[in-house]
């Protein structure tokens, strides 16, 4: 994690991976209060391709889908276990 701004409910991180196609992916995640008492999560992803590699839209969509699936698993765990966070 590179940045954590609790007052702005913002976190950003850089992930270095994805075989030989990507050098890295930078994520910025921000949580905002919603009108119904919950929260809205907004995530921005910045992909850095390796060399002259061109990323296909379906590859990016697949990465987004995996990130959302991970977020849903974390959310479900936290809802089931409210004692694990402040």
Image (cartoon, helix red, strand yellow):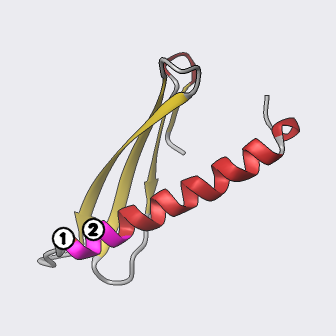
Left or right relative to 84: residue 56 = left
Q: Is residue 61 magenta?
A: yes
Q: Position of residue 16 (x, y in %)?
A: 43, 65
At 48% across and 22% down in the image, what residue appears? 34
Q: CA distance from mark 1 to mark 2?
A: 5 Å
- Depth order, front residue of 80/57: 80
Q: Residue furthest right?
A: 83
Q: Are marks 1 and 2 in contact (CB under 8 Å)?
A: yes
Q: Tell me: residue 46, above or below residue 64.
A: above
Residue picked out by circle 2: 60
At 58% across and 22% down in the image, what residue appears? 6
Left or right relative to 62: residue 2 = right
Residue picked out by circle 1: 57
- Depth order, front residue of 69/49: 69
Q: Tell me: residue 1, above or below residue 61.
A: above
Q: Secondary structure at mark 2?
A: helix
Q: Is residue 80 magenta?
A: no
Q: Secondary structure at mark 1?
A: helix
Q: What range of the chain is rendered magenta?
A: 58-62
Q: Tell me: residue 55, above or below residue 70.
A: below
Quarter of the image where one finds residue 15: bottom left
Q: Position of residue 13 (x, y in %)?
A: 47, 47
Q: Residue furthest bottom?
A: 20
């Amino acid at each position: 994690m590179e940045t954590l701004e609790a007052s702005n409910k913002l976190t950003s991180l850089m992930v270095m991976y994805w075989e030989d196609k990507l050098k890295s992916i930078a994520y910025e995640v921000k949580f905002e209060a919603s009108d119904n008492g919950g929260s809205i999560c907004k995530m921005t992803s910045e992909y850095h391709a390796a060399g002259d590699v061109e990323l296909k839209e379906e590859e990016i969509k697949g990465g987004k889908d995996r990130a959302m699936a991970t977020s849903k698993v974390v959310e479900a765990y936290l809802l089931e276990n409210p004692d694990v966070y402040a």
